[in-house]
Amino acid sequence: MNHDTYDNAYIGGILNSVKTIAMVGASANDVRPSFFVLKYLLAKGFLVFPINPGQAGKEILGRTVYASLADLPGPVDMVDIFRASAAVPGILDEVLKLNPLPKVIWMQLGVRNDEAAARAEAAGIKVVMNRCPKIEYGKLSGEIGWTGVNSGVLSSKKPLMRSGFQSFGVRQK
């Protein structure tokens, strides 16, 4: 798959199908991007499991932090990676030991590892690289337009309401 660009239908399909997310590299520091994204995804109704060995056993935003993916209490639909690109192969090794495998591996802005992506796709896992689910959700739901940002998505349709704080859901084609 070409990971330089993604069709809105591909990203929207992922965001609509995912319910549980493991966030590798979640931070308790409220000025870190991973903290903002964790808070946003929780507000949208996603069940998010923070992964951070330095914070294991503590809580971030009321969610128990786990040391590794192997410590998760159950399966997840997506693994969101907030770590350097060089750390992705090791994280993928952990992912491939999970049973069942997650549907998606999502690498945050600035995180890209084509070799790891090819390995994940060979195992049947969808991959998104160098994107943020918070930004993509806001873009596809129309929320990002509330602040005057051009999302590139035009619609005269009224947003579809979902549960969660100001949650409108992502449109399907």
Image: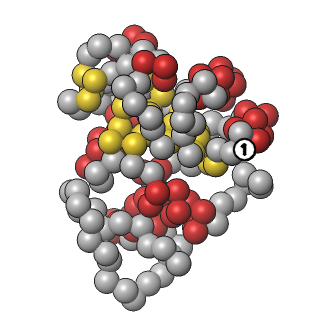
Visual colour scheme:
secondary structure
Q: Which quadrant does the N terminus fall into? A: bottom right
Give the percent coordinates (x, y) of residue 120: 70, 38
Which residue is rendered at x = 55% and y = 28% of the image?
98
Residue 37 seen anywhere in this rendered image of the structure: no
Which residue is farthest top?
A: 54
**Location of residue 149 (image quadrant):** bottom left
Disc 1 designates what residue?
A: 121
Which residue is rendered at x = 41% and y = 24% of the image?
72
Secondary structure beneath dot 1 equals: helix
Amino acid tagged 1 = Glu
Q: Which is more toward the observer, 148 or 126? A: 126
Which residue is rendered at x = 53% and y = 63% of the image?
13
Give the percent coordinates (x, y) of residue 137: 43, 59
CA neighbours of label 1 inside 10 A, class few (<14), some (14 to 19), many (20+): some
126 to the left or right of 150: right
Give the percent coordinates (x, y) of residue 64: 28, 24
Up-down: is 160 above or below 106? below
Which residue is rendered at x = 22% and y = 56% of the image?
164
**Location of residue 106 (image quadrant):** top right
Residue 10 seen anywhere in this rendered image of the structure: yes
